Image (tube, grey):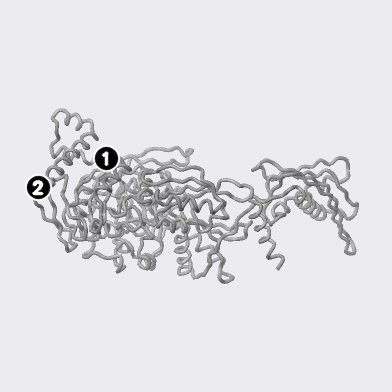
Amino acid sequence: MAKYKSGDILNFVLAGHGTVGKTMLAEAMLFNGGEINRLGSIDGGTTVSDYHEDEIERQISINSAILHTTWQDKKLNIIDTPGYADFHGEVQSAMRVADFALVTINTNAGIEVGTEQAWKAATDYGLPCMLAFNMLDKENTEFDSLLAAARKRFGSKVFPMGLPVNTGPNFTRIADILRKELHTYQSDGSGTFTVDKLPADLVDQVYRLHGELVELVAESDDHLLEKFFEQDQLTEDDLRGGMHGAIHNGSLIPVFPVSGEKNVGVRRMMDVISKYAPNAADFTEVRGTSLPDGGNEVPFQAAANGPAAAFIFKTVSEAHLGELSFFRVYSGTVKMGADLHNSNQGSRERLGAIYTMNGKKRAELGELVPGDIAAVVKLKHTHTGDTLCSADRKIVLPGINLPEHKVRAALIPQAKGDEEKISTGLSTLHQEDPTFVFEFDPELRQTIISGQGELHLEILTKRLKYRFHVDVDLIEPKVAYRETITGRGESKYRHKKQSGGAGQFAEVWMYIEPLPPGTGLQFESELKGMSIDRVFIPSIEKGVNAAVQEGVLAGYRCVDVKAVVYDGKQHPVDSKDIAFQMAGREAFKEAFLQAKPHLLEPIYELDILVPEDHMGDVMGDISARRGKVLGMDSEGQLQKVKAQVPLGSLGNYATALRSMTGGRGLHSQRFHSYERMPREDEQRVIKESKAPVEE
């Protein structure tokens, strides 16, 4: 395996909407670089990226694939990410360790929700971007209109590095702006091309665009700009010398016209990337939180001879190999057998075999320099998002911007006795994929799993079955409603029990009042004299707390209530702790029912991103779910709707939104508040809560 310096390593993410051809674009790059001897296909399930069974079966990318090839003596580390919104966490983790993003767009479909999502992820991490206008070999492609839309959305720095000449099924020719020549590609998928003079009808346009490219590059650098003003031009060497800086600082956003499936335009794209794209040596300073000196953020140099620092951005379990942890080295030279410190877990790790990966194919490496990406097997305590570093410089590198959970489901084992295996499996899956979380909700008495979408949860439960040998069902989780009051209620409850021998006696006089939202429960005593011994006050409070947890109307927790004990009676022999617990519990329930009780439902705030032509359907659906629209705004080519919807009406919303928008809509949701339920819905919930008891 050849050794590379940091300046010869380029790490980039292939990102974009689903079905824009990212996987085939990656396939073409691997073929051109000699890593594979023929192009695979999605239909045949033979691509390097999509090698998992689920990906082959569904013909979509589910996991980010770590790939590499060599081009012009540079190592290209390519992370091919899923476009399906359920797996956006894979995109975020890939962006975390990349030097730039190659955002891929289907020239037929234009800028889609996934395009916006990929662009935002890249800019959130401060990554420069390039654009690949893919699938120009399809019918009805619109390169010029897409270029105009991209400039409108992403700025005037968006610039074509080539012009497609004959788009459609016979697409083979591209006018190269940088070289001012015509490239005609072979139609056999080899990626090779011949060079010719420009057609007469394109000469003026190409030379004009070349001049505009010179101006963009000049504007990116003060020295070049001064030279441009003095000479009214830049030499070709000046142009090429300035392009790297222009791309790195965002002054130039190159657009490449390509067909990944036909391998047209890909070689020239790889030329430009290898020569001018940001590389690992451009990022000489790394910032991390130092330990244990109070957690201050400190910069340090990404030096090959310095202390080690590496970030784990992905964890997978591969058959016959075990757990693989993918990492990028930020400082120091990392070798097999090295002893490193896990700053997040406070543990020591010894590195086993280190591999460079191309999908499932791997090759062993001896060492890794700053900027390179590889995988290590069988780390004991290390998970996605952890930092490994030298013990003499303990730092924590910044984490991954994980997306919020969008869907929830209750997990029901099909067989008794599988609880321990399920718990182990869920924990392992969470460690591999932090966007998947689980918890046992004691109030609902359900195991709740949460993820990015129904497909995300379906895939994970399938892995639970085949890897941990447990069968589970997913059902709609219960909703954690709340019970409260709007008026005052009073009770004088006597608990008396005589069953031969010692009896039980307690009488509690109590009133309750509403409190402001969010207050919870307040318990007070206004007892005067010795009607009840003070030793029994904690017993009464314990009974009230039990009633609050059990609920009164429908079995849900009571909130925002003030309960006051003001009098009562006791018996010199039969009064005891359990008697006053029971009296306190029942007195609270009686008073609660007299205090104009009602149910509260959880309200979630939604941010919905949709194309404008689907706004009507989305707004109507929000209304049908008893939601209310708070506002609308434009976000690039899309519309962003902010709304509030009751959680009880959000079942399968991610699926419904995709159905309404043809897969082009996305949403995020988060808890907002509890609000009073409409009377009709309240009665339905109360009736449903009592049905099992009545049966």
Residue 86: x %, y % from top left: 43, 57
Residue 502 shown left or right of residue 439 in the figure: right
Screen quadrant of the N terminus: bottom left
Residue name at image x 17 percent, y 29 percent: 229
Identify the residue under disc 1.
157
Give whichever of 40, 33 is nearer the camera.
40
Give whichever of 408, 597 is nearer the camera.
597
- Is residue 232 visible to us here? yes
Badge 2: how crowded within 10 Å, few (<14), some, or many (20+)? few
Q: Which mark is residue 640?
A: none
Residue 114: x %, y % from top left: 37, 52
Residue 327 shown left or right of residue 434 in the figure: left
Give whichever of 437, 175 is nearer the camera.
175
- Is residue 304 visible to us here? no
Residue 160: x %, y % from top left: 22, 45
Q: How far, Cα to Cα, is label 1 from label 2?
A: 27 Å
Identify the residue under disc 2.
200
- Identify the image quadrant of residue 362: bottom left
Labels 1, 2: front one: 2
Residue 220 shown left or right of residue 287 in the figure: left
Tag 1's secondary structure?
A: loop
Q: Amino acid at mark 1?
A: Lys
Say above or below: 508 vs 498: above
